[in-house]
Image (cartoon, rainbow, N blue to C red):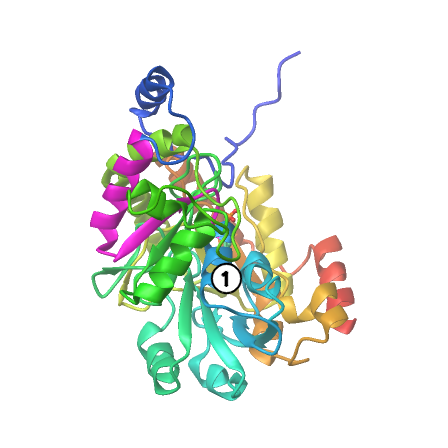
Amino acid sequence: MMKPAGPTPVPFHTPHRAPGQADYVMQALRHGHLRPGGPFSRKTEAWLAAYTGAESVVLTHSCTAAMEIAALALGLGAGDEVIVPTFTFCATATAFERTGARIVFCDIDPATMMMDPDDLERRISDRTKVIVVTHYGGASANMEAIGVIADKRSIHIVEDAAQGFGSTRNGCALGTFGTFGAFSFHETKVVSCGQGGALIVNTDDPALLERVSSIVERGTDHARVKLGVKSFYEWTGPGSSFLLGELEAAILLAEFEALQENLASRTHIASMMIHGLEEAALPLAVIGADGQTKSNFHFIPVLAESTVTATHLKLHLKRNGIDSRQHYVPLHLSPRAREMNYGPAKLPAAEQAWGRLLRLPVHTGMRDEDITAFLASLEAWRITGCSKQGIGEDAAQRRSIRSA
Ligand SMILES: *Cc1c(COP(=O)(O)O)cnc(C)c1O
């Protein structure tokens, strides 16, 4: 039986695959050093160090692991507070919470869906040790304003740049503004090796560098043995197994070498889509771009005038074969936040915005005809009056979360 003819499906994401990957993986299999720290790991790390200009970089198995290293290295524990934007992935909080520190949520600026510096100021107490900043959708948070607030009180900044690899702010790579930055190379991201990440260390404080080295050596001084200054290693502190394997590092090196083509392709696709969105005079705004960021266009976030409109557009695009997605339920509304009594109870900007947000797909698997189809379906939506019908389960679910 033939499938009925219909619009070409545009998935939300397809991972970029650099052509050199298979060759590098075969080379790694041949040299046979597959644990972390092999020849590809060293080359991939050197590439990343040169790209970021950071003091030191560590390849990890995930962005979450990179943030966990940061949390341990900063010596967080019970009695400390960590400020986290409420509109982010839960790993931004869990990586710090597991040290025993208390999470304090901060509201967002709906123009960017990122940390609102004015609200940040209100959340600071004398227990605040770290501010975690999430860069959203390939754009960047207001690092100048947040930097001033943090510097005044000597509070560390950690950047969750899971979505920001390849993006820059005023010419500097995201992940290089805080004491630490963390990238994700998970399959759902702009650059991926299946599962991977990196910690970017932007400090020359010898004590912190030493702690990072001991933490990633599973809490030992093994690094000294490798340097030949000691003949045996000992248990020295907290740590875990956080590093990236050699095969993933080989895949990642091929991806790094293809980064500019990957970004150019995404920029081409996203520019056409954003241009179409802005021309169409729809009841929604493209958010995130503030003129200081050069985005990797992880996806295009749009904020609709209402939850109903966002839900309706999502269903309309789906009928036209285009997959779009909503995003995070603000973390301060989560069961975990309620269980732990994490404050504050209300963050109005995030509560009003999250249900109106829709993410539109951008990936290198999209062809010009997919973009034409996307623009045509936006036009059809506009002509039919961006109909307000179509409130489905999603809206009902949101209402129940809001009233909980
Ligand atoms: C994907 C993502 C993470 C988690 O990355 P992993 O590499 O899967 O640990 C953390 N924070 C944000 C904002 C993300 O988008």
Residue 334 occupies which quadrant of the picture? bottom right
Q: Secondary structure at mark 1?
A: helix
Residue at the far front in the pictured view: 231
x 53%, y 48%: residue: 240
Image quarter (top left, top right, bottom left or bottom right) of the C terminus? bottom right
Q: Main SS of the magenta segment?
A: helix
* Quarter of the image that includes the N terminus: top right
Would residue 85 be found to the left or right of residue 20 on screen? Answer: right
Mark 1 closeness class: few <14, some 14–19, many ≥20 residues within 10 Å: many
- Which one is in front, 252 or 228? 228
Taking depth in this image into account, of 366 and 241 the one nearest to the observer is 241
Eyeballing the image, is 298 above or below 308? above
Residue 144 visible in the displayed image = yes
Numbered range of the magenta stretch = 39-63
Dividing the picture into quarters, in which one does residue 265 lie?
top left
Viewer-side residue, 146 vs 48: 48
Residue in the foreground of this view, choosing between 256 and 387: 256
Image coordinates for residue 263, horizontal then vertical, percent: 28, 44
The picture places residue 154, in percent across and down from the top left corner, at 38, 82
Q: Is residue 294 above or below residue 255?
A: below
Asked if the stretch drawn in magenta spans residue 215, the answer is no
Residue 214 in picture, x, y percent from top left: 43, 53
The response on whether ligand 1 sits within 8 Å of label 1 is no
Residue at image point 33% right, 55% down:
275
Quarter assignment of residue 391: bottom right
Q: Would you name the residue on which mark 1 appears? A: 72
Q: Amino acid at mark 1?
A: Leu
Residue 239, given in percent of the width and then of the height, sits at 51, 53
